[in-house]
Amino acid sequence: MKRRVAVSLLGGAALAPLARLSVYADTPDVCGIPAASNDGWPVASLADDKFLDPAALCRMADGLAANHANIHSVLIAHAGKLVFERYFSGYDEIYDRKIKNATFDPTTRHSLKSVSKSVASLVVGIAIDRGLIPSVDAPIMSFFPELADMHTPERDRLKLVHALTMSMGLKWIEATPTTGDDNNDEERMHWARDPARYVMGLPIVAPPGQEFFYSTGALTLVSAIVRKSTGKPLDEFARTELLAPLGITDFEWNRYKGDTDAGGGLRMRPRDMAKIGQLVLNGGQWNGRQIVSKNWIETSTARHLEATNGMSYGYLWWQGRSPNNGREDHWVGALGRGGQYIRIVPALDLVVVVTAGYYQDDSPQAFKLQYSVFKDTLQSVSTSS
């Protein structure tokens, strides 16, 4: 299957290999121990957990700090408990405001960029679970009577599932550091009087459901569909139906022209990102409460389409495989520009969250650096576990 995408989702800068650092600032028995809080997270130390090697993770985290990597946080949850949490300092961007020496801690909200898309998938699932959206097979045009003048046989074949799997077949230039100031459809869409009309008016270059076209424009349609179906902007529906049940109250989700920026506008604390990961790992449950149906979790995180860089794609969730010491760890992920991610490894009962500030660097070296945090975490798993 041909893949029509050339966008890097993670960024960074080339650093000296972190594994060379053998000295860490804190001893393993105190390094990265999460502080107990009233946010709903049970916590444990790595020494108590005995599943991950504390010394290896301390070397990894202290290596990031010593090399001035622009990683902002690393959090790890295992077996339903937060077991590792480290924050750093670095360069950040908040919307259009650039901050050179930002310092991060558990209270700092962070830009999720395209991790927002995966959170939006959960919101869609709740709306479908409740019958507010008929199904993923609903035609996109059925939600937009105001676009009646745009009906064509090709557009009428587009379904919600094609937006969720990035397979609408519409020509799209994603905004990346290499596209220039305004030479991308994401910018043009935001400037358009009617963003949904702009997206649906793009040239159709492949049959729907056949090829992977990474498109933030798909999320403009998803956001409008949620608003039209629930009577609330996506962020407000998410607030009451998804985030509040998770105990997530400290977040921002910006809007464009009245609709939630479901493609990249969410900001929340890394601890709350980890809750999203744990919710998925638990089949839609948090603290015994079923927030999203298990069926939606299983369907949305399953492989539906070959994507890019050896990964697959579900309903706004990525799937990947990581070879590690003779085994292959399969993971589900929410990935965002600049180095934001939630990676879930069901077989290891593991959630890894990283935030970073490499928004303007989509080089291979950048990806390698930020992926190395996840790789080092997998390599720290006890061989006896």
Image (tube, rainbow, N blue to C red):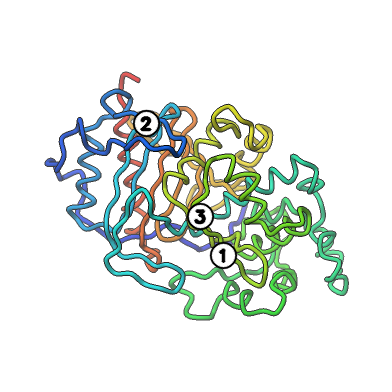
Q: CA distance from mark 3 to mark 2?
A: 22 Å
Q: Position of residue 169 (x, y in %)?
A: 69, 62
Task: Name the residue beneath numbered marker 3.
Answer: 251
Q: Amino acid at mark 3?
A: Phe
Q: Name the outermost residue toward the left.
A: 23
Find numbered disc 3 in the image and state the secondary structure of the residue it sits on: strand
Image quadrant containing the C terminus: top left
Position of residue 85 measured from the top left corner of the image (x, y, whole percent): 32, 41
- Tell me where residue 54 appears, x and y as whole percent: 24, 32
- Cα distance, mark 1 to mark 2? 31 Å
Residue name at image x 74 percent, y 39 percent:
129
Q: Which residue type carries mark 2?
A: Val
Q: Which amino acid lies under the numbered mark 1 shown in the image of this protein?
A: Asn
Indicate which disc, 1 or 2, sits on the residue closer to the N terminus: 2
Query: What numbered label is drawn on residue 254?
Result: 1
What residue sits right under mark 2 in the picture?
43
SS at mark 2 in the image: loop
Q: Position of residue 375 (x, y in %)?
A: 34, 41
